[in-house]
Image (cartoon, rainbow, N blue to C red):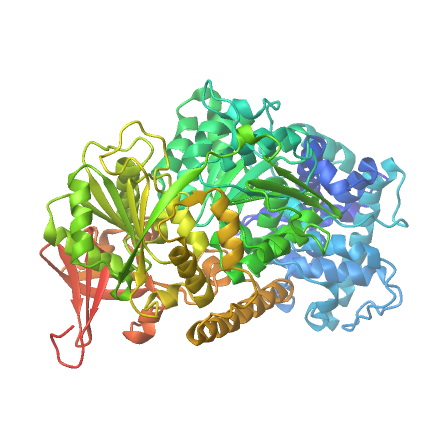
Amino acid sequence: MCQERYDLYRYWGKANRSKDNAPAESHLLPYHCLDVAAVAAYWWDHAPALRKQFSQGANEAEYRGWLLFFIALHDLGKWDIRFQVKCWSAWEALNAVPSGKNAIGKRWDHGQGGLYWFKQDFDADNDYDSAFITFNTHPKEQWFPWMEAVAGHHGYIHQHIDLPASDLALSFQLKPLGERDKQARLSWLDALAALFLQPVGLSLNDNPPSCSPLLAGFCSISDWLGSWSTKDTFPYQSEPEPLHDYFSRRYAVDAPLVLKRSGLLSVVKPWGGTEALLDMGHQPRQLQTLVNKLPHQPGLTIIEAPTGSGKTETALAYAWRLLDGGYADSIIFALPTQATANAMLNRLDKLASKLFEQPNLILAHGNSRFSTDFDTIKSRGKSVQEQEAWAQCCEWLCRSNKRAFLGQIGVCTIDQVLISVLPVKHRFIRGFGIARSVLLIDEVHAYDTYMHSLLEEVLRQQALAGQSALLLSATLPASLKQRLLRTYGNPDSSSPTDEYPLAIWQQQNRQLYFDLSATPQYLPPIFQLSIERCYLNEMQPDAGLLEKMITAAQEGAQVCLICNLVDVAQQVYQKLCASTSLEIILFHSRFTLTDRANKEDLTLRYFGVSGDRSVGRILVATQVVEQSLDVDFDWLITQLCPVDLLFQRAGRLHRHSRQCRPKGYQQPKMTVLLPSTTDYGNSNYVYTNTRAMWRTQQRLEQLGQSALCFPQAYRLWIDDVYRDETDESEPEWVADGLARFESEEQSKRYNARLSLNQAARAIPFADDDVHIRAVTRDGEMSLPLIPFVETESGRQLSDGQYLSQLSEFSLPEALALNRVNVPGGWQRRFRLEPDEEGVVWVAGTIQGGEWIAETTDYRLVYSKEVGMNIIQFNYQRGTQ
């Protein structure tokens, strides 16, 4: 130890506060830093795909030296008296100093502080104690991106030009101790250079290569794992030991254990071809035959194909091929809603073990902890002794949504992906998880302009990290497709063909497209759909249509009506229930989480691929059934909506081949409800692009008695409806509606740019579901409402639980399960007052199995069958 300065061992990095004035148990600062570096080193050495991404063609050995050097500097700000006195007994035990901590007590952010001292210690042109820093001629300017990344490991990356120097500079009284700290920091840099730089021929006089965007997340996770102090990993050590010996021991013993327990090291099974993901005896079909033709290198792939053409298996097979080629460690699958994410979890659970050895399959969204299917996946590992490590790492990964991006397969809502580019604490953890994964995004057409703007930035970051993304859709408007392609390079990129189905691959100036025109035997079968147009007041079913629906169900048909608004769906459901004893199911978003999950299960049980079709039934639903849910109907009725969503709804009609369907429904039948006037009523608030609605209606009317032919209609209709040119026949009211829509779109793009700009500058939001939705969804937000009954025992929730009887651990779960999300406009319209958490508590009574709350202006009613409904009174009480 003669070549190492003894003053390095006078600083603690981790400490357990003492009791009864006993000395605190401490872990020396150099050792904690080397714990983290040991995890990073072992991870690097055993993750070929990660090495390839980090180095981007640079010398891997040299890159590793710089990586470990900077990661071991992540806590440089702890070499400061203002941090050390946070545990005075630990500091006092390591240093013979007089008591005087009260004179030192000052808040100290050691992340910012490390970056500040790194700048100050190396800048000979600046006065050591100056609170003013010049930024033009610093000798280590090329080192700052690295130091900024590792110093941000507590959630926020500070830029060196924005440091609050006056807050970070030493006071006059601390200058003597400050000089000592400075010498220790400089000694630490010399020691790290000897450990990591010199063995690969580098020194402190050299400059590092470009800093990878992966570094901040990689460092933070290494810090978490290097702080995982247990009986057999990273125990505290306060006795000096040569740095090289200590690092070698932690690398060989402790780092492998924590990385195994965390599940971060992926073991990919050899590529087995698309056939390995299909059911026994099935061969690749349609798009699935293109997997071997797609480039075996990272890029952006857009897959456009009709419902049922095998997009999911195609994307997974291509992702597996990239994984096997060493281009990624994991897969992330993002979907529009929690319901679609839950459904995808079940599909991937059957396939995960074909791609990975002992895979960690993680569900990430605001209510994932309430998923019984996810609980089953987690508990499965606990029941098998050989999989104890798997169960432990699965639990560790599930403790927060941001960690869920670190397993082998992550299933999430799109919000969890978009947050990686927005001002939320630790956003770079998600960014790292996404960047090490092949990113799959389903139903890309389902997002609005604000979300698409955020998605474009996610894709730019994915391209910058040298990673792949696959976007899946029935089809996309040409302008949107071009913007998405541009995120991976060529600014003039556009689709060079109108073929359909189609896969386009983009990377820099190289663009390839793959269609099935050369192999017509693999083209999707032509699907002819007869469309009945029904003109009704406000596009709402009348008594005659309801009677036809009932008759069809009585004859054994599975009937679905899709409404654009929850209120309309509730009204139709109540009318049907009053007219028939048939089983009617209502499915929308305005239920409690428990009741909605039951509705979803019931919908799949009756109308899913293996649904009970022994009797006819009617489902009344909203948009919740149009995205990714595998349901199949004999007759589909829908209110008018834009063409791309109309086709999504049509994809739920005769979705599966069945030998027997009810008489009169052997051929698919779709009825579209159109307005009897020139106005779309309340649907205007849901679908604000009036031109898209009007052109869709024009296309339907021009169809006449002819059948609509799929898949050709996808490209022809959608491109026509969303083209920029104005029709001469376009009415003035359509032009006026379009002008309002375009103004709203411009506002959404502006808000997206504002949010993205704030990501690097603003103080981040907390990482929770409320804040995530607040920054990833533009426009009117839903309002969480909790119905309850005031009793002698206190507040009773709708499921019968009493708040007073809930522990602090079970309370959050109970509130989440009993919350109903209602339109945000209700807050102002009905003067609903949220509490400090943004939740509205409404007291009511139980009457006839329903919860009811009534004021002079409205009545709120909740039931398990109908969900939350509001009845507004007019001028005279009692009229509605």
| 194 vs 287, nearest the viewer | 287
Res. 352 in view: yes
Figure quadrant of residue 296: top right
| 22 vs 525, nearest the viewer | 525
Figure quadrant of residue 240: top right
| 66 vs 620, nearest the viewer | 620
Figure quadrant of residue 815: bottom left
Res. 155 in view: no
Q: Residue at x 64, y 49 (%)?
A: 495
Q: Position of residue 566 (x, y in %)?
A: 29, 59
Pick the quarter of the image with the C terminus.
bottom left
Q: Position of residue 639 (x, y in %)?
A: 32, 57
Q: Residue at x 50, y 71 (%)?
A: 744
Pick the quarter of the image with the N terminus.
top right
Residue 252's place in the image compared with 406, above or below, is: above
Q: Position of residue 164 (x, y in %)?
A: 69, 70
| 376 vs 621, nearest the viewer | 621
